[in-house]
Structure formats: structure tokens, C-alpha cells
Image (cartoon, grey):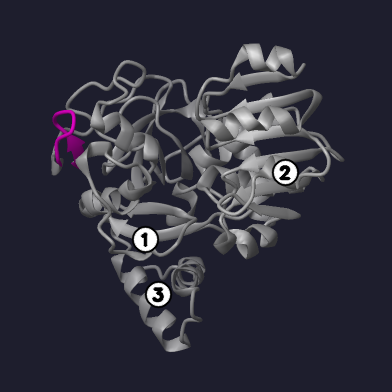
Amino acid sequence: MKAVRLLEYGGQLVFDEIPKPAIARDEILVKIKSTAVNHVDLVKASGTARQVLPIDLPWIPGHEFSGVVEEIGSDVAAYAPGDAVFGATSGMGAYAEYAAVKAAVIAKKPSNLSFEEAASVPVAAQTAWHGILTHGHLEKGQTILIHGGAGAVGAYAVQLASHVAATVIATASRDDEAYLNSIGASQVIDYREAQFEKVLRDKVDVVFDLVGGDTQKRSFLVLKEGGYLISAIQPVSQEEAAKHRVTGAMMRLAPSGDVLARIARLLEEGTIRPDVATVYPLQDAAQAWKDIAGNLPGVHGMSPSGRGEARRRSHGKIVLRVASGEHEIRTRAHELYLARGAQSGRELEDWLQAERELMAEPRRAD
């Protein structure tokens, strides 16, 4: 099978042929349709965090995917070949045509999402779920402050918090205010122009930290006694937490098929929605990495390329599309998208909508 691999820390990504993985009794072999790009892949590849984020070289990146079940292990009963699924990887990465994954960490793909949209969901949405609900214990009527609200994780946190009827305050840039308001934020604080602790009149029940550093330290000042400061970025000072009589914790994602299935239902209902910035073919993974490298200076020895839609949008995931037999549909979708005339700023969304419509058409029997 074709796969993208890293042969050495700080090296270049290579696109080459490797054996298809074998599956264990509790695993599923998935034919990958799409996978998403995450910052943590660049950090791992650089080797700068190898003490806490080691990888076995040669290494296939990719922590999330969407695809179709190709084969199931003898202990797997919940899935069958042909099922459309999405989820997180459990071992080898998803920058490949096939991946062997644990059945316990995947779920059925939402029927209303394209494979590209579905691939952008598992890591960010589950991180947000566990951050604000599992660890933050956010409840109806409470107030939450989300730092980095326009990022992939932050956007799901805003939507999930709004779904449980909490008041949502987010820090972000002014450019993202309209976007965040549209997905559930009642207040957006421009971190470049104001200090959130001076803007907030009342203290909050939960802070979800996706920024770290000084932002995290100042967050103790706006938390109610008994509140929660949950970080997905760095450890939380237990000394400061005790001083302010709050609970502080750093969370790590533990993928769960049950949680992902609940997220899938919310996606199908339209309660929450995915956000895809741009789509690259798998073989252009190196270019996709360059497009997000600007957010991680010095990581993997890259500098921002200035190319691609992702460089012009501050939110949304970059997705890699794995080659498949669906090129004809994709071509027809592009033709339909051009015929309709895309709205400015909605080019990718209109193309994916056209693709979903064509995928839903009855297949002709040959």
C-alpha cells in the first residue's frame, strides 16, 4: 500500500510503498478515505518533544481518519466489511491507504458528512468533549471561558458548551468573532487588544485552556472558588490551584468509540458541525504541513509557505484525501459546483455539498 512516512527526526516526509498491515482479533482493517493534519504530528516529527512524545522510526503520521471497513478481526461483532467509519488510530498512523485500528475507538461515520469532513472530527471533538464535560464537569447554566476558541478543539468546545446550555465566552482574534458567535459564543474577547481578566465582570465556572503560558496563569484570577481549570496544552500548577481553591488538571485524549458515537449523533442532528479549511491529496502531505507550520515556529524546520487556503483562514482543519475509486464522483461534484457558482468564502463548503448530493444518488447496477 501507499503511505507517507518519516524516516528520521526532522527529516522530510516520503511517499512510498509498504506492506498492508495485519490485524489482531480485536482490530479492524480500514481502507482510509481521508485523514486530518494535527499540530502534534509536526511536534513529534521534529523530535523536540521526544522525551514525552516518542515515535518509532520509520513512522507514519496521522491520528484520525475516515474510511470503509475492509476486514474485521475474529472478536469484532459491531462492524462488518463495507461499513463507513471514522475514528482515531491506535498504533500506526493514518497517512496511508490502510490502517489497522481497535474496534473500541471508532464509530459509524455520520451519514450527512463527507469522508473529508468526518476525518476532521475525531481528535478535536473528543478532546473538547473530555476537556469540558468529562474533566470540566460543565453543566447547564454555568459559564465557561475557552482560550483559543477559533481553533479546531476550541470550536468544538464552543459548540458542545452551547449545546449543554452553558454561557460561552471565548478568547480569539477579532477576525474570528463572527464565526464564534455563529457557533454559540455569547462573548468573544480579542486577546490582542484586551486582557480577559480585565474585561470579565463576573467569574466563570470552568476555564478550558488551549493556549497555555501566561494565559493559563491569569486564568486563575477569573475562576470561581470550586471551579475547574482544564488544559490540553500544559500541566496546571497545583500550588496555584490550591491557592485559589479550584481544581486544575492537564488532560490527555483517551479515544472512545462510545463518546465518538455520541458526537456522531450530534453531527447528524446538526447540533454541531465540522470545519474543514482545505483538502490536499495524501501525496502532498509535506505541503499541508508547511501550511500549518507558521503556528509552530521552528517545528520540523519548516517555515510557512504562504500558499493554500489554510493560510488565509484562521480556523478549520486541513484534511488529506487518500486516492480512491471515487475520482469520477469528485470530478462531477467539481463540475456541479462550478455550474452553480460558488458563493465567496464558501468555495470548499459548496464543493463538499455537491459531493454529498452525488454520493447520495442511487448507484446504477452494472
> What is the spatial separation of the Cα atoms under label 1 and label 3, in whole angstroms?
24 Å
- Amino acid of disc 3: Ala
Residue where numbered disc 3 is placed: 333
Look at the numbered disc 1 and give the secondary structure of its residue.
helix
The N terminus, quarter of image: top left
> What is the spatial separation of the Cα atoms under label 1 and label 2, in whole angstroms?
31 Å
| Side of 91 relative to 232 (left or right) | left
Q: Nearer the viewer, mark 1 or mark 2?
A: 2
Label 3 near label 1: C-beta < 8 Å?
no
The image quarter in which residue 14 lies: top left
Question: Residue 117, position in %: x, y?
Answer: 48, 55
Residue where numbered disc 1 is placed: 311
Q: Classify 10 Å Cα crowding around label 3: few (below 14), some (14-19), many (20 and above).
A: many
Closer to us: 81 or 314:
314
Look at the numbered disc 3 and give the secondary structure of its residue.
helix
Look at the numbered disc 2 and give the secondary structure of its residue.
helix
Counting residues from the N terminus, which is met first, the one under dot 3 or under dot 2? Answer: 2
Closer to us: 220 or 234:
220
The furthest residue to the right: 141
The numbered mark at residue 198 is: 2
Residue depicted at x 31% and y 54%: 291
Q: Classify 10 Å Cα crowding around label 2: few (below 14), some (14-19), many (20 and above).
A: few
Question: Residue 325, position in %: x, y?
Answer: 29, 60
Residue depicted at x 53% and y 24%: 254
The C terminus, quarter of image: bottom left
- Amino acid of disc 2: Lys
Q: Nearer the viewer, mark 3 or mark 2?
A: 2
Question: Residue 143, position in %: x, y?
Answer: 80, 40
Magenta segment = 2-12
Closer to us: 353 or 197:
197
